[in-house]
Amino acid sequence: MTETGIEEKSPFPVGGSTFEEIINDKGVYVDKTGLIHALISASWSDAPYFLSRPRRFGKTLLLDTIKCIFQGRRELFSDLEIERRPAFSWDAFPVIHISLNSTKSEEGLFEPSLLKVVKRAALENGVVLDSGDSSSAIADLILMLSLDHKSSWKKQGKDPRLLYKGNVVLLIDEYDFPLISNIGNPEKQEKIRLTLREFYSSIKSCLRYLRFTFITGVTKFKQVSLFSSMNTVKDISLDERFSTICGFTIQDVKTYFSKYMSTTLSDLKSKRQVDEHADADSLIEHLMKWYNGYSWDGKSQVLNPLSVLTFFENRRFGNYWYQTGSSLLTSRVANNAADYFKIFDKDLSFDDSFPEMDLYNLNATILLMQAGYLTVASTTENGPEILYALKVPNNEIRDSIRLELLAEFFVPSNMEPGKSYLNQKYLQFLKAFNTRNEEECEFFLSAILAGIIQRGAGSPQTMEVKERVNEKLQQATTTEFFFRSLLQLLIEFGNKSVMPESPSDIGRSDLAVKSSNGWVAIEIKHEKADSAHEQTDVSHNKRDIVLGGRSEYVNGRLEKMINQAFIQIIQKNYAKKYLADGFDVYAAAVAIYGTSDVMVRFRKVIWKGDQKTNIALY
């Protein structure tokens, strides 16, 4: 509190502050105006721009900053890069700034809400519209502002030839929000799509009046005519010149947050989130592991701005991005296990540039990248084409993936998904894993698989979509890769060190886990169920998952797979390298029959003289 009793505003703008508010309140503003100057001064700046970035990644603040620049508000840019550019003109132009994330998609409400958004933008420019629909309203507004400004320009004695590129600035934020919010509901999507198609077609008819047009979103949908009608749209999403226009570089963090490092370190040490001897350099390293790694050119990397700002606000490492609901896209788009688990594919990539997405046949790999779950790891030029290799960017996203997938596959459908439930169940599983409690481990793994079977019971999807999703889900859950990935997520949820496909001199174990008792080499075996013997006695009571007993046939199949797994661990020396380093080493065999029957066995690995490694009963 200040002496006046008025609470001082936080310097970290995590609540959607405007550019003007950040500057006037002396908040932290990471200067991107040099890149903005390059953007609006480019020779092709009369073409509409499109920028794809994940939710909560600074797109809105970027547009608001551009708005203030074109309004000629030079006083807000004192000591910023663009203000130091002597050739830049600070002439003021009318700016239409609209965001589609405030539209309503309920039956019959989307068009009226879009019309309201345009009329609100008109009032901000001193114009009252009587247009009856959003398409007419946006065209009327552009034309009226252009004519009024041209008249004012002439009255000021300015050269009208300077307006040859147009004189209205149009900024559209989250253009695809209404469509993404309704993925899984094709009927509602189609009505929204038709409205948006007319809306963007109206904008296309007014391009000659527009001096600068910038559109942001997550992905590019070809059915809304934005990109097909505006065939001159310049997509800068993967342009290396603007790869850091959103997000913070490491140098940004060192420059703009340096004065907050000392107090932040003190708090982190008191919370035991960093070592007591940690300094500013080690804090930067922690920040990089948690929030860095995003790249759109395979070269420059940035940290998630929301997460960094919230970290300095709370002085605690945490998963802040997921808590904002930024997972909306993948939770609705990648609505089957096959799509979710593309994240773990080491060879994920795409060619050239973001394609225009088919609204009804979505490319899960591209969407996971555009949503922020994957990022560009490297690029390879092949003639005129560029191959973009992908990876998971950082610890925060790994934690987000774990939360989303474990909530999807571990939380029973009759309970609300949430981190508290997952933490509670995970602690029980972790205790069972560390103490080698086979019965408890088997129960938790079986519970996950039962959750998969029961998945989707309360989801608001049409029967047709449910049947399609369930079919894909059943296909995806018939691979060892699926079970290995799910087990890896479960173990990693407690920050355990897990190495998938850990190599030995003659093979690779499915998983290698560093635990408090040493190392565990895990081998997973899976068999498709014989329909005549598949276990189907799975049900839910109020709080727990109830599993039926296994038949003698199924039990025999599981025992056989357990033996095969142990033999493979020994013959391929999966555990030998850890024994050589002096660690206690355990072998874990996981056998899965069908989609619901699981058997887990732990054994300690020992030396017998100079003989090869053996597994003894633990």
Image (cartoon, grey):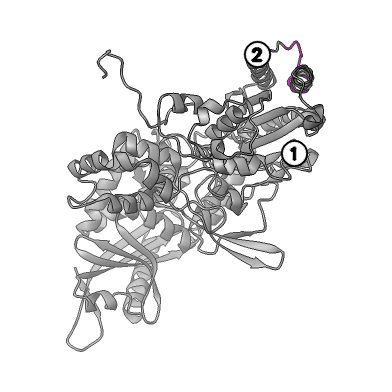
Amino acid type, callout 2: Leu
Q: Quadrant of residue 572?
A: bottom left
Counting labels gives 2
- Occupied quadrant, residue 137: top right
Can residue 411 be seen here? The reply is no
Q: Give the spatial CA distance, label 1 vs label 2.
A: 26 Å
Decide if residue 485 is on the left or right side of residue 431.
Answer: right
Quarter containing the C terminus: bottom left
The N terminus lies in which quarter of the figure? top left
Residue at image mark 2: 123
Residue 483 pos. (x, y %): 43, 58
Range shown magenta: 129-139
**Picture residue at 41% right of the left edge, 51% below the top:** 398
Residue at 66% across / 16% down in the picture? Answer: 125
**Which residue is disc 1 drawn over?**
46
Cβ atoms at labels 1 and 2 below 8 Å apart = no
Give x and y (percent) for residue 285.
33, 54
At x 56% / y 28%, what residue is drawn? 74
Evaluate whether residue 18 shows in this view: yes
Q: Is residue 130 on the magenta stretch?
A: yes
Q: Of callouts 1 and 2, which one flags the residue occurring earlier in the amino acid sequence?
A: 1
Q: Position of residue 515 (x, y in %)?
A: 24, 61
